[in-house]
Image (spheres, grey):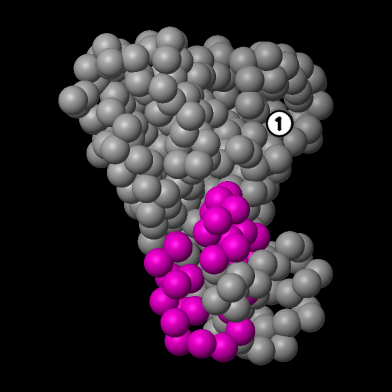
Amino acid sequence: MAEIILAKTAGFCFGVERAVEKVYEEAEKGGVIHTYGPIIHNEEVVRDLHDRGVRVIENEEEIDQIKEGTIIIRSHGVSRQIDEKIRGTGLNCVDATCPFVKRIHRIVENKSAEGYHIVIVGNPDHPEVQGIMGWSSTPVTVLRSKEEAADFVRHMKEQGSLASAQKDLPDAPGTKYCVVAQTTFNANKFEEIVAILNETSYNNICCMNTICNATHERQKEAESIARRADLMIVIGGRSSSNSAKLYEICKRECGHTYFIQTWRDLNLSPTGYEQIIGITAGASTPKKIIEEVLNHVRADF
Ligand code: F3S
C-alpha cells in the first residue's frame, strides 16, 4: 500500500474559509443573500450557494437594484466607493474582507492621506488590486513586472529632473512613494521590483511587504511533498490561477503530477511502484472535494 500525504495547507486559506462560512451562516438565517462577486472561484460552491438562495452581484450598477436582504463583501474586499455604496443601501451588510486585505486598505488610506503616491505591486485586473486602488486619495500606480517597474523608475527620474526646473510638477524630488503588494503576489518578484524602485535615491520610498504567507506556505509544502512523491495530485478549479501555479511547481519536482477538478477526473492506473502519493489543492478548493479525492485515491492505491 502506498503512503498518501495530504498537504496540511491544501485548500481554503484563513480568509476564504472565513468568508465562505459567513455566507453559509447568512444563508442559514434565510432571506435574500447577495455576494458582491462570486465568493470564491469554485463552480461547485457557487452552484451550491445558488441553491441556497445566494445571488451574485456582478457590478456596481446592480447594487442600486437590490431592495431587500443582505449584501456580503467577499474576502478580496472592495474599493471605498463600493463599500460606501453597499452600506448606503441601508440593507444588512456583512463585510467578509480578509483582515490581511483590510490592513492594506488602511495602509493605503493613511499613507495617501499623508501625501504618498501609492504603488501597488500586483495584477491591475485583479479585484483585490482594484479594491485597494479605491482606498487611495492620491495617484496610484500598479506594477506587475520588472519591466513596468523600470519604466516607472525612468518616469520618476524624468519627472524629478524636470521638476528641478519647474517646481510645480506633482512628482518632484522628495515625492513620497508607498509601495504595497497584492496579497497573493510572488515574493521573489516583489523583491526584484522593490530593488528596481529603490534605485531612485532621491525619492522617499516606504515599502510594505503585504504578501500573505498562506500562498507561499501552500506552495512550499506542495513543492516539498512533490519532491518525495512518485505521483502528485493537485486539485483546483479550471480557472484558478493559484492552482495552476501549484501544478507548475509540483510538476517541476514530480513528473507524474496530475491536475484535477474533482475525483471524477481521476484517471490513474496504479503501476504498483508508487510508494508515496502526494495531494494538495488550490486556495478555492473546498474540504469536501479534497476528502472525496483522498477517499478515491485510498481505494485505488
Ligand atoms: Fe487572506 Fe491570505 Fe487568504 S490575504 S484571503 S488569508 S491568501
Residue 221 location (% of width, % of height):
29, 27
The total of numbered circles placed on residues is 1
Q: Residue drawn at (47%, 24%), measured in percent from left and top?
A: 258
How far across and how far down the image is residue 11, in percent?
39, 44
Asked if residue 292 lies left or right of residue 260, the reply is left
Q: Residue at x 72, y 88 (%)?
A: 67
Picture layout, residue 125 above or below residue 145: below
Quadrant of the rendering where the N terminus is positioned: top left
Q: Secondary structure at mark 1?
A: loop
Q: Which residue is mark 1?
A: 171
Going by the numbered disc 1, the residue's amino acid type is Asp
Q: Is residue 300 visible?
A: yes
Q: Position of residue 41 (x, y in %)?
A: 58, 49
Residue 188: in sight, yes or no? no
Quadrant of the frame with the C terminus = top left
Query: Which residue is at 47% across, 79% downward?
Result: 26
Residue 31 falls inside the magenta stretch: yes
The image shows residue 168 at horizontal and vertical percentages of 78, 35
Q: Is residue 192 magenta?
A: no
From the viewer's side, name the closer residue of 232 and 106: 232
**Relative to 225, is 45 above or below?**
below
Q: Quadrant of residue 187?
A: top left
Instruction: Estimate how packed mark 1 is, as few (under 14), some (14 to 19) or many (20 or more) residues with alpha carbons within 10 Å.
Output: many
- Residue placed most toward the observer, 67 or 298: 298
**64 in relation to 227, above or below:** below
Bounds of the magenta segment: 19-48
